[in-house]
């Protein structure tokens, strides 16, 4: 599983490989130290073309999912008038607050995607709405 994120300090994209789901939480911890006011998004991608983006803001996150077939969807959280903001590869991205789920839920879904990808092709284990 590949990962990438934009490092605002270096003004460049950082890429690498993940082998365990627990590494997702470690990367998110790192990202929150890079820019606390607008955390860089973490993108995970499989060789089949599927991908997951985590947009983190404090204790919440938006999960954006694209299947291997190219259909896209987003996480569904509680009703909220508050917008979510994160840095998507150098661009401020704002999404409705009701797309956000608790950060722990997003980390579990992303870790599960990494862990199960090799055997099942994995679909995130959280409610999603089609875009």
Image (spheres, rainbow, N blue to C red):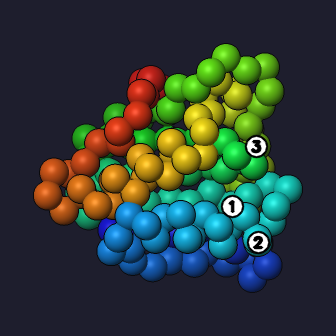
Instruction: Please give the name of the residue rendered at 33% of the width and 61% of the height, measured from the top-left corner.
Output: 114
Instruction: Please give the name of the residue rendered at 80% of the width and 27% of the height, measured from the top-left corner.
Output: 82
Spot occupied by residue 74 in the image (x, y as percentages of width and height): 49, 33
Find out whether the residues at labels 1 and 2 contact each other: C-beta distance under 8 Å: yes
Q: Which mark is residue 34?
A: 2
Position of 68 with respect to 93 (left or right) is left
Position of 78 with respect to 22 (left or right) is right
Mark 1 crowd level (few <14, some 14–19, many ≥20, 10 Å Cα): many
Residue 114 to residue 72: above or below: below
Position of 90 with respect to 5 (left or right) is right
Q: Nearer the N terminus, badge 2 or badge 3? A: 2
The residue beneath circle 3 is 85
Q: Which mark is residue 54?
A: none
Residue 28 to residue 86: above or below: below
Find out whether the residues at labels 2 and 3 contact each other: C-beta distance under 8 Å: no
Spot occupied by residue 51 in the image (x, y as percentages of width and height): 39, 52
Q: Secondary structure at mark 3?
A: strand
Instruction: Please give the name of the residue rendered at 78% of the width and 20% of the height, measured from the top-left corner.
Output: 81
| Quarter placement of the N terminus | bottom left
Q: Nearer the N terminus, badge 1 or badge 2? A: 2
Q: Nearer the N terminus, badge 1 or badge 3? A: 1
The residue beneath circle 1 is 40
Task: Looking at the picture, tell me which residue is in the foreground, 87 or 54.
Answer: 54
Find out whether the residues at labels 1 and 3 contact each other: C-beta distance under 8 Å: no
């Amino acid at each position: 599983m590949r990962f990438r994120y934009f490092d605002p300090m270096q003004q460049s994209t950082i890429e690498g490989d993940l082998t365990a789901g627990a590494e997702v939480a470690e990367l998110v911890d790192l990202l929150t130290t890079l820019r606390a006011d607008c955390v860089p998004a973490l993108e995970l991608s499989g060789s089949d073309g599927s991908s997951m983006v985590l947009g983190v803001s404090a204790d919440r996150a938006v999960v954006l999912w694209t299947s291997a077939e190219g259909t896209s969807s987003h996480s569904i959280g509680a009703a909220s008038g508050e917008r979510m903001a994160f840095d998507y590869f150098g661009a401020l991205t704002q999404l409705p607050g009701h797309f956000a789920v608790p950060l722990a839920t997003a980390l579990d879904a992303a870790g599960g995607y990494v862990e199960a990808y090799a055997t099942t092709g994995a679909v995130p284990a959280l409610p999603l709405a089609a875009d």
